[in-house]
Amino acid sequence: MKQTKQRGRTASTSKKNQENNEGTKNQDQGGSRLEKFFIEQLKDIYYAEQKITQALPKMQEAATTDELKDAFEDHQYQTQKHIKRLDKIFEMIGVSAEGKKCEAIEGITKEAETIIDETEEGTMTRDAALIMAAQKVEHYEIATYGGLIQFAITMGLPQVAEILERTIAEEENTDTRLTEIAEENVNLGAEQETFSYSWEKNESTA
Ligand SMILES: [Fe+2]
Ligand SMILES: [Fe+2]
């Protein structure tokens, strides 16, 4: 699921904000409130990316199909790059690179762990559930990076925006790849597994 609409909406809002705020930008000695929020959100995603590098190897190990294992492995490498890019951005804006605990990613990655506990090893149902959990992670990242890109543009930091664009493109590609894995193979396989629990279907039609 692409987030183009949301990103588009953010873009137009930011343009308006840019026009409205031109006269008031950087009024405070310590930078604008938007800058402060931008840095807070950078710290949030910095924490989140590190949490994701801990979660992905567990998800890779738990996955049933090689296709999904490969997707998680590839994204693990990308996620390490995302952290390096954030390091670079912190350096560019002269702020020390540090994470701020992100409750959202704590919850989303906890959910992925629960899925591993609650699904049977070697089943397609586990992969179907893991894909959903992974897509929740990707969508959180896409929402955060989408906002950060627009903030960077508004604040007149096009090079920062360009770095963040590279990351969001990888998050979106991962999201698409996961959808394809689910739709081409995994969901159908999972449906066949649940078919043996015929009492569920009989109950729903009773
Ligand atoms: Fe990432
Ligand atoms: Fe990601």
Image: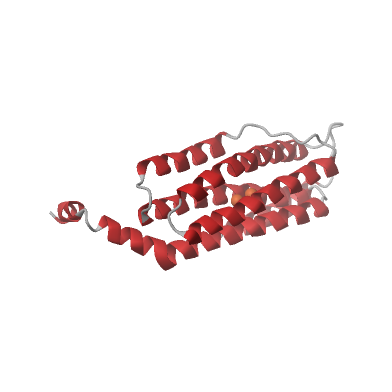
Specify the quadrant that holds the C terminus: bottom left
Q: How many marks?
A: 0
Q: Name the side, left or right, on which 130 lies relative to 167.
A: left
Residue at the image point whose x is 44% and y is 58% from the top: 65
66 over 203 or under it: above or below: below
Residue 82 position, x and y percent, is 69, 49
Residue at the image point whose x is 60% and y is 56% from the top: 74
- Which color scheme does this rendered protein use? secondary structure
* Residue farthest toward the bottom in the current orientation of the protein: 184
Nearer the observer, 124 or 42: 124
Residue 37 position, x and y percent, is 71, 37
Q: Name the side, left or right, on which 160 lies relative to 179.
A: right
Asked if residue 3 shows in the view, the reply is no
* Residue farthest toward the right in the current orientation of the protein: 29
Nearer the observer, 112 or 141: 112
Residue 126 position, x and y percent, is 39, 51
Residue at the image point whose x is 46% and y is 54% from the top: 131
Nearer the observer, 101 or 149: 101
Asked if residue 107 shows in the view, the reply is yes
* Residue farthest toward the left in the current orientation of the protein: 206
Residue 117 position, x and y percent, is 39, 40
